[in-house]
Image (cartoon, rainbow, N blue to C red):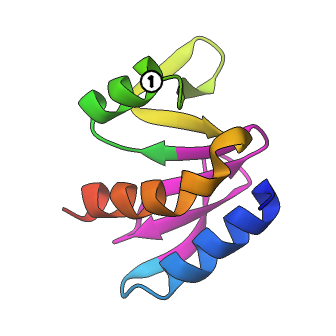
Amino acid sequence: MDADAAWEQVERDELAVDGVAPGTGFGRSSGLRVGGRIYAIRHPDGLVLKLPEARVGELIEADDGQAWGPSPGRLMREWVAVGEAACGRWAELAAEARRFVSG
């Protein structure tokens, strides 16, 4: 599955969940919100997700993600970018991010 198809699947699955709505994240990028709060953003480099700081660290340590921020030099501790090489995991990670943000 390529990254665009993976994102389309994530959108379909997540928008079927009660309370999830489309929205933009940190600019014009397509994203997903729950309870008005952004939790997933389709970024040119992959998928950006809001997860607990410890989980972000785990993904970075395992080389499954990179620290992310909305501008150079401004990294955010609860945000991680998961590259296109891992697009097969995007759906499970997006669901995890939704649960975190709505929890």
Q: Is residue 43 above or below residue 55?
A: below
79 relative to 16, above or below:
above
Q: Give me the residue at 62% from left, 55% from top.
A: 88
Percent x, y of residue 93: 45, 54
Q: Quadrant of residue 8?
A: bottom right
Q: Residues within 10 Å of mark 1 (few under 14, many from 20)?
A: few
Quadrant where the N terminus sits is bottom right
* Percent of width and height locating residue 24: 63, 60
Q: Is residue 15 magenta?
A: no
Q: Quadrant of the C terminus?
A: bottom left
Residue 29 is situated, as x and y percent measured from the top left of the image, at: 72, 53
At numbered mark 1, what does the secondary structure look like: helix, strand or loop? loop
State the residue in front, 72 or 55: 55
Prevailing secondary structure of the magenta residues: strand
Viewer-nearest residue: 92 or 25: 92
Residue located 26% across and 65% down the image: 102
Judge whether residue 43 is colored magenta.
yes
Residue 13 lies, in percent from the top left, at: 53, 80
Q: Which amino acid type is marked by label 1? A: Ala
Which stretch is magenta? 21-48
Left or right? Give the position of 58 relative to 76.
left
Q: Is residue 11 above or below residue 47?
A: below
Is 49 above or below relative to 5? above
The picture quadrant where one finds residue 34 is: bottom left
Residue shown at 45%/35% (left/top)? 79
> How many discs mark residues in the rendered view?
1
Circle 1 residue: 62
Residue 71, quarter of picture: top right
Q: Nearer the viewer, residue 3 or 44?
A: 3
Q: Residue furthest left?
A: 103
